[in-house]
Amino acid sequence: MGKIIRQKLPTEYSIGILLLIFVLSFFLSGRLFETHAEGHVPNLYIGMFLVSVVVIVMVFILWEELFFPIKINPTNEEVIFRNHRNKLKIQVLIYLTIPVILGFLYVNYKVNLFSFIPYALVCLIAPVVGKLGTGINNYNDFLRLSESEIEYKNNELEGVLQVTDITGLALIKDEDGIISKLDVTTQDHAQLTIDLDEMELEEFYDVIEEYLGLHYTDLLK
């Protein structure tokens, strides 16, 4: 049974927010077109509708709390923290509709380039910079904690540490008090730093700290 770390917003709120954003985008989208141009094909209102759809897709990707809860699936033996792959796959698939719709609008409508180009760049770049880029980069990253082992993977850095070989653990926080790293000291006095802030595990920080406090009490500094 999965444990929910972050609830999604109630469905009626999510739909209401998206409808509000859609309506606002629809009424503001007229400035993206040369409305005085003759022979709009297809209808200008369809173009305005598609402009709003692109905005909704962008918001859907960036604002994960709308429809994507965060869960972990702890067992009696271990707990694994990782970026949820199914969520990322859905986000990538719906993102692909953005360039398709933007291309359709550019080809079939007389657009106002002064307004359309900034709009298109924001809709194309914001989801990649805000969510998809780091999600894809950290697709295989994870932190696994168990009574006997600590295993991690951060891009090219990975390893398995036996708890019996560890003499100390320390959670390092940044200047804002947010967890950023896990420092590990082993019996041979070696120091290892697991960069949690590079693994897109922000939603799990509180749970990670709680788990370490419960299961590694004697090691935690």
Image (cartoon, rainbow, N blue to C red):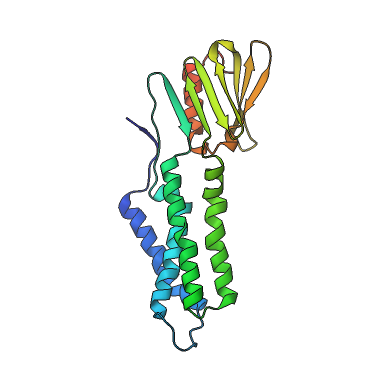
State left or right for residue 114 relative to residue 205: right
The total number of labels drawn is: 0
Residue at 56% x, 62% y is: 122
Side of 144 relative to 68 (left or right): right
Q: Considering only vertical position in the picture, is 56 above or below 87?
A: below
Can the viewer see residue 178 in this picture? no
Instruction: Answer left or right for 67 relative to 137.
Output: left
Name the residue at 67% across, 11% down.
188
Q: Quadrant of residue 79?
A: top left
Residue depicted at 33% across the width and 49% down the height: 10
In the visual, does 86 lie left or right of 117?
Answer: left
Could you say where residue 91 lies in the image, as x and y percent from the top left?
A: 44, 51
In the image, residue 145 sits, relative to residue 25, either above or below, namely: above
Q: Position of residue 28 (x, y in %)?
A: 47, 73
Question: Residue 56, percent across and down?
Answer: 43, 61
Residue drawn at point x = 47 percent, y = 89 percent: 38
Residue 206, above or below 32: above
